[in-house]
Amino acid sequence: MTVTVTDRISFEDTPPAHGRGWSQRELREINRIRVACGNQFYVELAFGESDEGDPWCIAWEQEGERVVLHIARIDSCYVIAGPCRSRLQRTTSITAATDLALRWLDRELHEHFRPGQAV
């Protein structure tokens, strides 16, 4: 599977809905990640789809352009990756995936970033 960042979005935009896209229920859950990132001025969300049409979302740190969290739906499962810690986990529940993603994101942001700190 090839994944490329196709668009960077602001917090007011909605992700693309090509291919199989995110459902409204999934978007409500992903919005929880958006809210958590919205409190961090140096972290943004980006959305895209793989060549196969699988939707994905990343939280990335603007200054160093470093991905801090990746969540995707692949073959009816949700894959959550924490690239900074080389973690990968699968679940069949978008709620469980979002809960885990939020825990990882919170830990990553508290360990490595401070508001106003150069990265």
Image: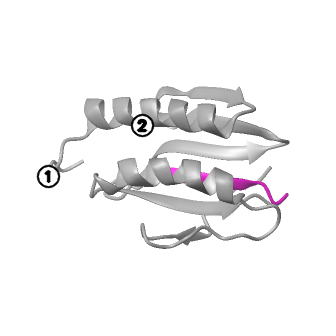
Q: Which residue is drawn at 85% across and 42% down?
A: 75
According to the picture, the residue beneath numbered tag 1 turns out to be: 116
Element at badge 1? Answer: loop
Specify which label sits upstream in the sequence, 2 or 1: 2
Q: Which of 100 and 87 is in front in this view?
A: 100
Magenta stretch in the rendered image: 52-59
Q: Do the CB atoms of the residues marked 2 and 1 lie less than 8 Å apart?
A: no
Task: Give the image's coloring scheme.
Answer: one colour
Which secondary structure class fits the magenta region best? strand
Q: Residue at x 47, y 48 (%)?
A: 32
Percent from the top left, x then y, of residue 104? 45, 31
What is the CA distance from the residue labelled 2 to the residue labelled 1? 18 Å
Q: Is residue 101 located in the magenta-colored stretch of the structure?
A: no
Q: Which residue is drawn at 41% across and 56% down?
A: 65
Residue 105: give its label: 2
| Quadrant in the rendering for residue 92 | top right
| Quadrant in the rendering for residue 112 | top left
Q: Residues within 10 Å of mark 1 (few under 14, many from 20)?
A: few
| Quadrant in the rendering for residue 76 | top right
Badge count = 2
Q: Look at the image and tell me whether residue 56 can be seen.
A: no
Residue type at mark 2 is Leu
Residue 9: give its label: none
* Residue 52 left/right relative to 73: right
Q: Look at the image and tell me whether residue 80 can be seen.
A: yes
Residue type at mark 1 is Gly
Element at badge 2? Answer: helix
